[in-house]
Amino acid sequence: MGLSSFLKRDRTVAGAGFSRWMVPPAALCVHLCIGQAYAFSVFNLPMTKLIGIGQPAPEDWKLTQLGWIFSLAIFFLGVSSAVFGRWVEEGGPRKAMFTAACCWAGGFLISALGVYVHNLWIVYLGYGVIGGIALGIGYISPVSTLIKWFPDRPGMATGMAIMGFGGGAFIAAPLSVWLMGQFRSATHVGVAETFIVLGVVYFVFMVVGSIIVRVPPAGWVPEGYVAPRENKLISKNDVFVYDALKTPQFWLIWWVLCLNVTAGIGVLGQASAMSQEMFPGVITPVAAAGFVGLMSLFNMGGRFCWATVSDYIGRKNTYFVFMVLGFVLYCTVPHAGAIGSVSLFVVCFLIIISMYGGGFSTVPAYLKDMFGTRYVGAIHGLLLTAWSAAGIFGPVLVNYIRAYNVNHGVPKAQAYNTTMYIMAGLLVIGFICNFLVKAVDKKYHMKREEGEAALDVAGEAAARA
């Protein structure tokens, strides 16, 4: 049996006795690996000393140049998830996971070459472009499969996998630092060797996930499953991927996700500096680092907890909680700084970041409710362009407004207040967008014969591949 045959969708159909609880670990094998993206910053300072070793040399790369590596990766995550979403859906999760493994490992190996020859453009190509494509394909690869295996708890199922993306940095950050320490010498800092090791290790784990994953047989439902009662916001009909783009529901949810992520990602990237500047002399660099680690933990836990909660209170209500509670918390942060309450400040941001993570894990189930399960993976891929946009909006709002305030004489401890109120205002807009989400018009529903034809086309495409 050749590799192409092994990767075909029809080779991944589960046989009798297969446990659906094997699918979340398969998804985690991929998401824990690509979640390394959140820990890439541990390489930034060492990569400014590739020539100078002990300290940056004039020929070394600058932090501003290195910052584009992560930005490119997130940009191509959104682009690739949108471009390849339908291919992932029709080709099946195994082929998508294996492709993501090859691109992710290849991105690290190419980046190692770029570090070795000291060519930053090669690193941009490796981690930024090829690695970013791996992020997009890998991120969406298990989504629709999990939803099909867990029609009774779609939020919990996607939350388990996407939790891995938020928690991957917990493994990657200390592992990367340890590896660089092992490879460091008097002539090099160990970055290239660490990239090679990570590429190989991640490839192995992601391939294991692709081997384990299965799709359910046609018409399968879990034992004892009772379909949800009639609900205008839970559709039993499917919408074709490109027809979803014609609906107002898609774009309303796009803005809901974009605004929720914008509000969270800006402060996530500046949490350490913000905490030290708002509480000078109280929060030390070591304490700030601990705060960032705690935020990462809540980012990961929020992805599972909020998505699970959404199975009970509904996706729309969950986002209402995000918007209302987030508004209150963002407005409270300046007050916490004014009264010097570190504990209130920390609690506010831990809850905010949990909702940031929860927004990612809840949205696939929200899309499933709106557009059905047939093309939910592809539609999710298109929606992730909201993440790419938020990755620009959030940091720009935080960084440039802070700089403007400081340049105009505002004390650093108060320089973030305006940003917090703007973030609160964005969540008001998100609340309105979420309020306007209604059931998808019947004219967009696929007819039964269209769904069968789509399945036939997908099967033929998979067979040709």
Image (cartoon, rainbow, N blue to C red):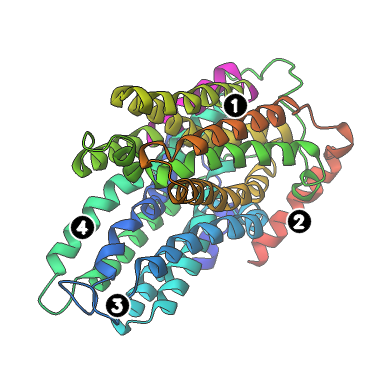
Query: In the structure shown, which secondary structural element does the residue marked by tag 4 occupy?
Result: helix
Magenta stretch containing residue 312, yes or no? Answer: yes
Q: Which residues are magenta?
A: 300-316
In this figure, which residue is indicated by the disc labeled 3? 60
Q: Residue 430, position in %: x, y?
A: 65, 32
Quarter of the image that includes the C terminus: bottom right
Q: Residue 8, position in %: x, y?
A: 57, 59
Q: Residues within 10 Å of mark 4 (few under 14, many from 20)?
A: some
Q: Residue 441, position in %: x, y?
A: 85, 32
Are dots 2 and 3 in contact, CB under 8 Å? no
Are dots 1 and 4 in contact, CB under 8 Å? no
Q: How many marks?
A: 4
Q: Earlier in the sequence, mark 2 or mark 3?
A: 3
* Amino acid at pointer 4: Val
Check the image and name the residue furthest to the bottom.
117
- Residue 254 visible within the image: yes
Check the image and name the residue furthest to the right.
443
In this figure, which residue is indicated by the disc labeled 2? 457
